Image (cartoon, rainbow, N blue to C red):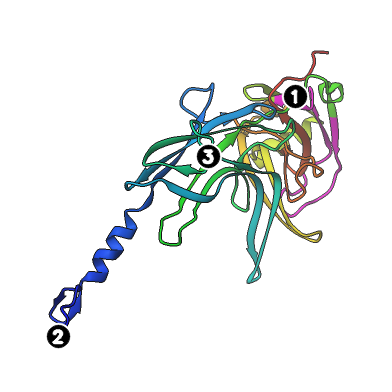
Amino acid sequence: MKKRSNVLSTHGRSIGVLRIVTIIQTMGVQSTNIVCRSDRPGETAFRCGETVNGSVVVTIDGHKSHKFSSMLLKVRVQAKTEWEENDTNYSETQDLFRLDLPLRSATTGETSLPPGQHQLPFSFPLPERLPHTMKYHEAKVVFLLKARLKSSSMWSWDGAQEVKLRILPQRDLSQCFDLAAPLKMLREDKWTMWNGNPGEFSVTVAKQGYVAGETIDLWIDASDGVYTELAQLDGHVKLKRLVVAREGKKNYNEERTSIATVKPGKAASAWHRIQLTVPEDEITMDDLALCRIISVTYYVKVCDVHIPVTLGTIPTPKR
């Protein structure tokens, strides 16, 4: 007698396997989410030294407990650079903070979870010194949490989720007495391709350290003829950001961006004193011991004179 097959066929195609696959796909992790608690409503942002608290929320489907061979929260703060030059690609990644936290059920403390929703709590402090998160064309600093739940059974789905958080800018200038002092720079009487030769003059800034919203005061000291030349050039005075992305010890790429611009105009008197306002979310990051592949610095550009300034979040001391 011919045995009856348990696999149904439609036009010669087996559908029994499809049913088995469907059953397998409904076993294990249905969803994985990372939830962080922040004291700042509307955003998951933290300062250096603060503690990050939260939980990985896992939903298990099916009718039996699900066992995991590993349950981890991977914490990564990374600096990344990438650019192309002369048909050559350059890139590098630097781990600034790295932590792997084992996860356990908040109720059972186990790695075997019954069907339903479960909270896997986590808590860790951020280091006292880290760059803030940022993103430019060729350079960025990212803060990632990656939940990885690996099932013991090869026939079950693993759980995986990744979220990006912010590290807020933080640079204290209150003890930087040198940045509270004025700075004077001299331009020599020389011809340049881009600026011609307006003549010799000096530029003085009232101080060298600023925070968002502060005014950068510049005084140009020159002869009447030089003031007239500057006015006739009808140029701009700019606050510029310089981002340097590095790969290894020799390769680097520079990105210069104007973040504040003033056009004094064609009146010679307008070039005696010039003011620029520092915009939000601009912070100097120039500690290569902290991050060796990215630096962010600032300067004020008057013709071909570059006056360095440092931007922070807490103002310089009053003089």
Residue type beneath disc 1 = Asp
In front: label 3 or label 1: 3
Residue found at x 73% / y 19%:
315
**Disc 2 from disc 3: Cα separation:** 50 Å
**Residue 131 spot, x, y in % from top left:** 69, 38
In magenta stretch: residue 267: no
Circle 2 packing at 10 Å, graded few (<14), some (14-19), many (20+), is few
In magenta stretch: residue 189: yes
Residue found at x 74% / y 30%:
128
**Which dot marks residue 172?**
1
Query: Which circle's residue, 3 or 1, is located before the other in the chain?
Result: 3
Tag 1 near tag 2, CB within 8 Å:
no
Residue type beneath disc 2 = Lys
**Residue 71 spot, x, y in % from top left:** 54, 46
Q: Which residues are magenta?
A: 184-210
Query: Which circle's residue, 2 or 3, is located before the other in the chain?
Result: 2
In the displayed orientation, state which residue is furthest to the top: 319
- The image quadrant of residue 270 is top right
Q: Quadrant of the C terminus?
A: top right
SS type, badge 1: loop
* In the rendered image, the vertical position of residue 161 relative to residue 275, given as above or below: below
In front: label 1 or label 2: 2
**Which dot marks residue 2?**
2
Residue found at x 61% / y 37%:
259
SS type, badge 2: loop
**Residue 119 spot, x, y in % from top left:** 46, 34
Give the residue at mark 3.
110
SS type, badge 3: loop
User: Which one is nearer the viewer's eye here, 299 or 261?
Assistant: 299
